[in-house]
């Protein structure tokens, strides 16, 4: 009973506020705000409610932080002089007292010198509503949009009149639409809403189609027998679209994971696929690319901070060269002595990988290194029901670009031609004047360089640590084995298939088990097609 | 696959007219030497420990090396003789270790932190109400010991049956065995699996009534490990010198010829794979009580590859060499990680590169070449030296 | 009763018809030479007969058994021996062990594991036949190319097959060895059916047997060498070049 009365009072107070304050942005003077705030000392719940109402009535945007602080329980009053303050905890059971409006430091006192202005749930709701109203008519449209969204979430029938008033005054279409949705949601809270209004509101919820809208309908359905069918159908419609969007989200995340796998595996597709060399140090070449990015960013941070957004463009060619050079060293120093002995190559390159790991650990330390996202890779945007982060999007594009680059190198350049010649018939190629040793080194270097590029991309989404490479090596071999060695398209198909499969399994099985299931699937798949998806067929394979 | 000569038939001087074929003996000089060394370790290490010349921890350390030696012998049978490079042998070792660990967990009984007579501590901690079905029976030692052999053997059988039947060979097989152990590692890290998650199984108290913390028990386990190595060696050696062993080496060298001779290659591979996995499981079962813990880290692909370097360093296709390699690398690891922790991975990595490029036949291979060379400089046929062995 | 029957057999790889409606019969004890240009389907045909490759269609029967469902080991057990173009012996085994592994015996895992029989007499016989008595305890890897060819032939004889498939036996042999090989194959015919795939016309002439010419996966001509080599089509696709 008391609650109802209080909400009526609040409501009336708020209504008064709108009448009293015709235009926004016009402050009622700091002194009146301070007077109101000072009332909080020793106030009971009703008194606090009054203060909240009055504060909201000022329409002064500076009171919003005060209300937030009050809601969070950070407002205190000093026992000695009843001064109302905001307080921060500092060590030794002390509090730092701040001016609630300006944030200026007033004093540091023992906890018992002050008393907290306590709020209960009812008051919190009052504050929310007040804040919603304060912001509903803010001059800033973003603030208004947020306020409308907040009202939609709270769905407090008491705010309906305020919302109506704000809606009437609203000129921005987007904000108005958001407010109408909030209004519809509030209407559906009330079983007494007229059937025609309710029907329109249900339509709007279906239109909105997200899980919040679904909750509104689910709340309404049992309240009104006449319209429950419409609401149920609405829920079903929303469920269907939500399911589609969640599939789409899975596909998107799968593509994203697939692009990472593709980046990690595509260099292998060159060294393993084209040359038949098992390079277990491939992951470490990826790691070298990531550390190159780190070094470039450190350099930019200290000497040319304005270049930070360009850091990846500088790091990419450097990473390609660094990893490529290391790759060429591995080929000339180790791998070339072991051609035709794949298992030995595997072991020797594993040894190289251990050395590279420890070298990086000794130079950069064992801990994760911070690599920053340039501004164009930060944040996210919404596409229908999808949330798309910029860094993932760029990495997908980057992976595809690297893929196309590699296709180009293999098909259209002299190096690519010589590579294919050497792969198909080494002796013949040598007789035709191709320096097979040089081609081997370049091919391996190309694969290694691509691994370095992958490292640049991975530095944006993963921890840059000496273990970076290890975490990708099994996965990337799986991609090559699944896709079929010696075929770039196989790597592409393999990476995206595995990525998407992984993401579709995750909701049912959890991330780790999904990975295990995918590994088991590949192990079984190899039974059926021992040479992968895009394998060469026929007698040639047996040779 | 490069030809690994290693052991071969002992030529009788007038062999061309021999009425019977030359058979290799189960134990040649090298085999006897190996068994004698094992016996010397089993007797000598406890004796030195009793006189105070060796610290207590050294006994368990030797026991641990012996487990590694058995694991290496198991892998050598598979890789050195059959040419199948498993990068997942740590999985069989760890499964054996877990089987024994589960028994040791049950043995703790109500002496755990939560004093629950039925549930191991980690299950109480995770609010499990009852023992999962796959933990039943592990309170009995004989069952756990059986499972330590059976589970790795079963996994090897199922995995091998699929892989060999579809003729996955060489590098592809190596990579999927690595994926297998990787998948198992991920799975065992999960608490829901019921094997203690991250922390694995530990805090063991006793086995068959013997206190695991006492030096007598530790010595006993070390001696048991030495006996297990001897038995493992003899089993592998018996297989290798049999006609089946010849078939297995033939598969390594010319698989398709074996098929066209009418041998079902899959069956032989499967036999070797399963036998090798069971020996690895036995090694793991002995390992767990001696180190006092088994956790999912034992499944890590890096561990499996380390086993391969033991075999490669010692000399593959020799069995004895594998055991030597395991002890050399494990001892080097103990010393170096203690003295220069930064240097260990450099040394291990360098070892992989050096051995594969410069010592493809391993320590024993180099030894054989040296001795052969000495015989030749004295104008004698090195084959006669082997004749004497 | 034919020993080997191929009737309308087809097999394609990625759309390329390696074998296209191949029909061929071989009688028990017959010696048959098969010739044809590269890509005519000779090797694929042998793969199909030995169960290495499954046919897409058609009938393959050997000694009354359907061969389209068997594998290499199965075909060997039914009595088909195959010699590769490149001599394939067990390099790290001794010559006698190579023969021991080839002799008819229990081939199961446990059969060989506990095998006690050593077939010493039979091995000595074979060694005499392939003239490798004094190399008995040497590793096969240490043999010369020609000796490896002989060892492989010895291994096939040890199998005692009903049908021998021989892929270019004369490749890499000296003239004297070639002549000896031709004589040996003629000797073998009668006890065993022998199919020889060969490029060397002199060798085929020395075999003095019925010749089948393959072209694009099917039979182009069949008959004595003189008749076949007079055939217009054969000259066009093969001999004329």
Image (tube, coloured by chain):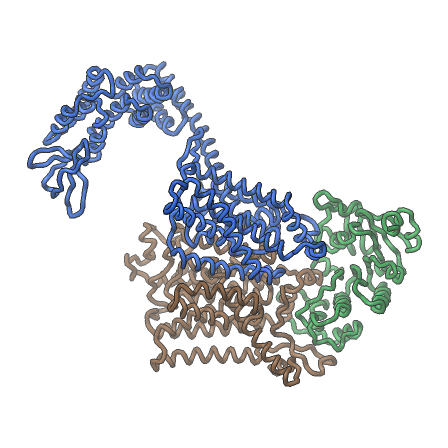
Location of residue C241 in the rendering, given as x and y in whole percent from the top left corner: 86, 51
In the image, taking residue C124 as reference, residue A182 lies left or right, namely left
Looking at this rendering, what residue extends furthest in the bottom direction?
B378
In terms of image quadrants, where is residue C173? Answer: bottom right
Seen in the picture, residue A530 relative to B236 is either above or below; the reply is above
In terms of image quadrants, where is residue A3? Answer: top left
**Residue A60 visible in the displayed image:** yes
- Residue at x-position 51% and y-position 56%: A281
Q: Which chain is blue?
A: A
**Residue A520 visible in the displayed image:** no
In the image, taking residue C240 as reference, residue B352 lies left or right, namely left
In terms of image quadrants, where is residue A120? Answer: top left
- Residue at x-position 77% and y-position 72%: C126
Seen in the picture, residue A361 relative to B243 is either above or below; the reply is above
**What color was chain B assigned in the picture?**
brown
Location of residue A540 in the rendering, given as x and y in whole percent from the top left corner: 70, 52
Looking at this rendering, what residue extends furthest in the front direction?
A303
Location of residue B298 in the rendering, given as x and y in whole percent from the top left corner: 43, 60
**What color was chain C assigned in the picture?**
green
Viewport quadrant of the N terminus of chain C: bottom right
Q: Which is more toward the observer, A358 or C96?
A: A358
């Amino acid at each position: 009973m008391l609650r109802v009365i209080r909400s009526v009072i609040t409501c009336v107070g708020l209504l008064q506020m709108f009448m009293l304050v015709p235009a926004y942005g016009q402050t009622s003077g700091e002194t009146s705000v301070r007077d109101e705030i000072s009332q909080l000392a020793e106030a009971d719940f009703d008194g606090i409610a009054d203060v909240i109402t009055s504060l909201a009535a000022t329409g002064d945007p500076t009171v919003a932080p005060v209300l937030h602080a009050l809601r969070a329980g950070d407002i205190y009053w000093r026992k000695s002089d009843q001064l109302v303050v905001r307080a921060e905890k500092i060590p030794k059971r002390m509090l730092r007292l701040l001016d609630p409006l300006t944030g200026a430091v007033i004093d540091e006192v023992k906890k018992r010198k002050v008393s907290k202005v306590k709020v209960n749930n009812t008051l919190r709701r009052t504050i929310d509503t007040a804040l919603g109203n304060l912001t509903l008519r803010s001059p800033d449209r973003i603030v208004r949009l947020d306020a409308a969204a907040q009202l939609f979430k709270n769905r407090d029938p008491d705010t309906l009149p305020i919302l109506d008033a704000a809606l009437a005054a609203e000129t921005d279409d987007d904000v108005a639409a958001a407010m109408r949705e909030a209004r519809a949601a509030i209407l559906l809270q009330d079983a007494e809403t007229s059937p025609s209004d309710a029907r329109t509101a249900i339509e709007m919820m279906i239109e909105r189609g997200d899980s919040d809208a679904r909750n509104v309908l689910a709340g309404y359905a049992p309240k009104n027998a006449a319209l429950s069918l419409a609401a149920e159908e609405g829920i079903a419609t929303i469920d269907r679209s939500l399911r589609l969007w969640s599939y789409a989200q899975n596909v998107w995340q799968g593509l994203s994971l697939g692009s990472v796998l593709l980046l990690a595996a595509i260099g292998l597709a060159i060294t393993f696929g084209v040359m038949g060399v098992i390079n277990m140090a491939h992951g470490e070449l990826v790691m070298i690319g990531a550390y190159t990015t780190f070094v470039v960013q450190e350099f930019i941070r200290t000497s040319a901070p304005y270049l930070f957004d360009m850091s990846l463009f500088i790091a990419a060619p450097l990473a390609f060269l660094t990893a490529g050079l290391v790759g060429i060293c591995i080929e000339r120093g180790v791998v070339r002595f072991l051609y035709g002995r794949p298992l030995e190559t595997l072991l020797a390159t594993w040894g190289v990988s251990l050395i590279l790991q420890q070298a990086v650990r000794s130079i950069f330390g064992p801990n994760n290194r911070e690599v920053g996202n340039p501004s164009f890779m930060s944040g996210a945007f919404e596409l229908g029901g999808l949330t798309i982060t910029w860094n993932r999007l760029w990495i997908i594009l980057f992976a595809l670009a690297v893929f196309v680059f590699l296709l180009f190198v293999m098909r259209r350049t002299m190096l690519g031609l010589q590579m294919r010649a050497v792969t198909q018939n080494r002796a013949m190629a040598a007789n035709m004047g191709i320096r097979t040793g040089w081609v081997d080194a370049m091919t391996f270097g190309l694969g290694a360089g691509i691994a370095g590029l992958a490292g640049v991309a991975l530095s944006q989404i993963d921890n840059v640590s000496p273990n970076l490479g290890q975490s990708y090596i099994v996965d990337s071999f799986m991609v090559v084995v699944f896709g079929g060695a010696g075929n770039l398209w196989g790597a592409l198909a393999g990476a995206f298939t595995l990525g998407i499969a992984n993401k579709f399994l995750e909701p049912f099985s959890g991330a780790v088990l999904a990975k295990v299931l995918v590994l088991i699937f590949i192990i079984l798949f190899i039974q059926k097609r021992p040479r992968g998806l895009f394998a060469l067929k026929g007698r040639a394979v047996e040779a | 696959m490069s030809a690994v000569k290693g052991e071969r038939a002992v030529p009788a001087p007038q062999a061309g007219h021999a009425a019977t074929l030359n058979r290799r003996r189960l134990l040649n000089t090298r085999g006897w030497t190996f068994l004698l060394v094992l016996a010397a370790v089993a007797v000598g290490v406890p004796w030195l420990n009793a006189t105070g010349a060796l610290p207590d921890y050294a006994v368990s350390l030797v026991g641990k090396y012996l487990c590694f030696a058995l694991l290496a012998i198991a892998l050598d049978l598979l890789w050195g003789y059959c040419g199948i490079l498993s990068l997942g042998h740590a999985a069989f070792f760890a499964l054996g270790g877990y089987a024994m660990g589960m028994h040791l967990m049950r043995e703790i009984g109500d002496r755990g932190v939560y004093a629950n007579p039925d549930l191991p501590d980690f299950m109480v901690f995770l609010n499990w109400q009852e023992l999962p079905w796959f933990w039943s029976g592990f309170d009995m030692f004989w069952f756990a010991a059986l499972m330590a052999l059976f589970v790795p053997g079963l996994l090897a059988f199922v995995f091998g049956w699929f892989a060999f039947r579809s003729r996955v060979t060489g590098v592809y097989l190596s990579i999927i065995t690595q994926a297998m152990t990787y998948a198992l590692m991920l799975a065992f890290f999960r608490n829901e699996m019921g094997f203690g998650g991250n922390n694995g199984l530990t805090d063991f108290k006793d086995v068959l009534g013997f206190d695991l913390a006492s030096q007598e028990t530790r010595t006993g386990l070390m001696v048991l490990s030495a006996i297990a190595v001897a038995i493992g060696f003899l089993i592998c050696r018996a297989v290798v010198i049999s006609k089946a062993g010849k078939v297995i080496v033939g598969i390594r060298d010319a698989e398709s010829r074996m098929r066209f001779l009418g041998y079902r290659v899959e069956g032989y591979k499967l036999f070797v794979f399963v036998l090798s996995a069971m020996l690895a499981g036995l090694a793991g079962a002995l390992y767990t009580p001696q180190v006092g813990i088994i956790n999912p880290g034992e499944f890590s692909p890096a561990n499996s590859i380390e086993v391969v370097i033991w075999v490669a360093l010692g000399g593959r296709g020799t069995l004895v060499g594998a055991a030597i390699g395991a002890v050399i690398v494990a001892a080097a690891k103990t010393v170096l990680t203690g003295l220069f922790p930064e240097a260990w991975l450099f040394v291990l990595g360098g070892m992989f590169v050096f051995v594969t490029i410069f010592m493809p036949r391993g320590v024993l291979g180099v030894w054989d070449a040296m001795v052969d060379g000495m015989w030749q400089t004295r104008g004698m046929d090195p084959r006669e030296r082997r004749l004497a062995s | 009763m034919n020993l080997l029957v191929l009737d309308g057999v087809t097999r394609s790889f990625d759309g390329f018809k390696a074998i296209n409606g191949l029909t061929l019969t071989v009688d028990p004890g017959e010696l048959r030479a098969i010739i044809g240009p590269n890509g005519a389907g000779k090797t694929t045909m042998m793969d199909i007969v030995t169960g290495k490759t499954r046919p897409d269609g058609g009938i393959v029967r050997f000694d009354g058994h359907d061969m389209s469902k068997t594998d290499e080991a199965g075909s060997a057990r039914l009595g088909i021996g195959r010699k590769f173009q490149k001599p394939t012996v067990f390099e790290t085994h001794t010559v006698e062990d190579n023969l021991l592994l080839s002799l008819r015996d229990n081939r199961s895992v446990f059969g060989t594991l506990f095998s006690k029989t050593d077939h010493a007499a039979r091995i000595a016989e074979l060694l005499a036949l392939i003239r490798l008595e004094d190399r008995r305890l040497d590793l096969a890897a240490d043999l010369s190319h020609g000796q490896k060819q002989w060892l492989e032939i010895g291994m096939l004889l040890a199998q005692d097959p009903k049908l021998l498939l021989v892929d270019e036996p004369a490749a890499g042999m000296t003239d004297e060895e070639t002549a000896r090989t031709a004589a040996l194959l003629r000797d073998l015919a009668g006890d065993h059916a022998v199919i020889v795939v060969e490029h060397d016309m002199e060798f085929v002439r020395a075999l003095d047997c019925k010749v089948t010419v393959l072209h694009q996966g099917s039979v182009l001509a069949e008959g004595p060498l003189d008749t076949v080599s007079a055939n217009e089509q054969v000259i066009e696709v093969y001999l004329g070049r």
